[in-house]
Amino acid sequence: MIKCRNLTLGYGCKNIVNSFDYEINSGDYLCIIGRNGCGKTTFLRGLAGILRPKSGKIELCDNLQRKQIGYLPQITIAQKDFPASVEEIVLSAFQGKSLLLPFYGRALRERARECLALTRTENLRKACFRELSGGQKQRVLLARALCAAERMLLLDEPVTGLDPESSQNMYSIIKELHEQKKMTIVMVTHDVEAATKYATRILDFNEIVK
């Protein structure tokens, strides 16, 4: 599904990921673990197409397209306090796809509601995003990422800062997306216990950068 060949990623003059070879297969639930600063997020940003390789390449295979990959980055303070409704947040995933912004057609609205249902947030559709709990906000942002994720979902520490119940809800939803929707999952996490429990493959970046 994705082949990385002699891949080097970094920022400015600093290389974070060096001459890395790896393959992600269709149907994988891949968890990426490792200490802070070892390149996990950098690699994920490369897969998402946000960060261009300095050398080598990231090859999309099996007819995978960038528009079929959803990406949930680490939540920022600005995102937590965004003054919009849940529905508006999720629909914003379609910016660039609607020719009549800020008006979205029926098909896009139906897709947004489907993603809200998948993340168990459809009852929050009209709620103000900034007033939600941390777990609810993260599930709404997951719904937004799902609007683009037809085949692959990239998750960067999706349970960071969440309480145990909210974390379990997120893991349960992600498991359903993998098993029932046949979605390929790539998740950066510090939760080794959860990685061992849910992942079909584990990639330890500590071994790559040592």
Image (cartoon, rainbow, N blue to C red):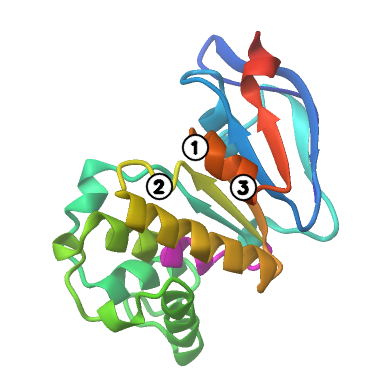
- Asked if the stretch drawn in magenta spans residue 179, the answer is no
Give yes or no for contact between labels 3 and 2 (Cβ–Cβ under 8 Å). no
Q: Residues within 10 Å of mark 2 (few under 14, many from 20)?
A: many
**Amino acid bearing label 3:** Lys
Q: Which mark is residue 197?
A: 3
Nearer to us: label 1 or label 3: 3
Whole-number angstrom distance, CA of label 1 to CA of label 2: 9 Å
**Amino acid bearing label 1:** Asp
Q: Quadrant of residue 100?
A: bottom left
Question: Of callouts 1 and 2, which one flags the residue occurring earlier in the amino acid sequence?
Answer: 2
Give yes or no for contact between labels 1 and 2 (Cβ–Cβ under 8 Å). yes
Q: Which residues are magenta?
A: 142-151
Q: Is residue 198 left or right of residue 134?
A: right
Whole-number angstrom distance, CA of label 1 to CA of label 3: 10 Å
Residue 37, given in percent of the width and then of the height, sits at 48, 18
**Which residue in the rendered view is the most extreme toward the bottom?**
106
Q: Which mark is residue 191?
A: 1
Question: Of callouts 1 and 3, which one flags the residue occurring earlier in the amino acid sequence?
Answer: 1
- Asked if the stretch drawn in magenta spans residue 143, the answer is yes
Whole-number angstrom distance, CA of label 3 to CA of label 2: 15 Å
Residue 46 in view (yes/no): no
Q: Which residue is drawn at the image coordinates 64% and 23% (left, top)?
A: 205
Q: Which residue is drawn at the image coordinates 79% and 56% (left, top)?
A: 26
Relative to residue 118, is residue 191 depicted above or below? above
Relative to residue 84, is residue 10 depicted above or below? above
* Residue under label 2: 159
**Which residue in the rendered view is the most extreme toward the right?**
62
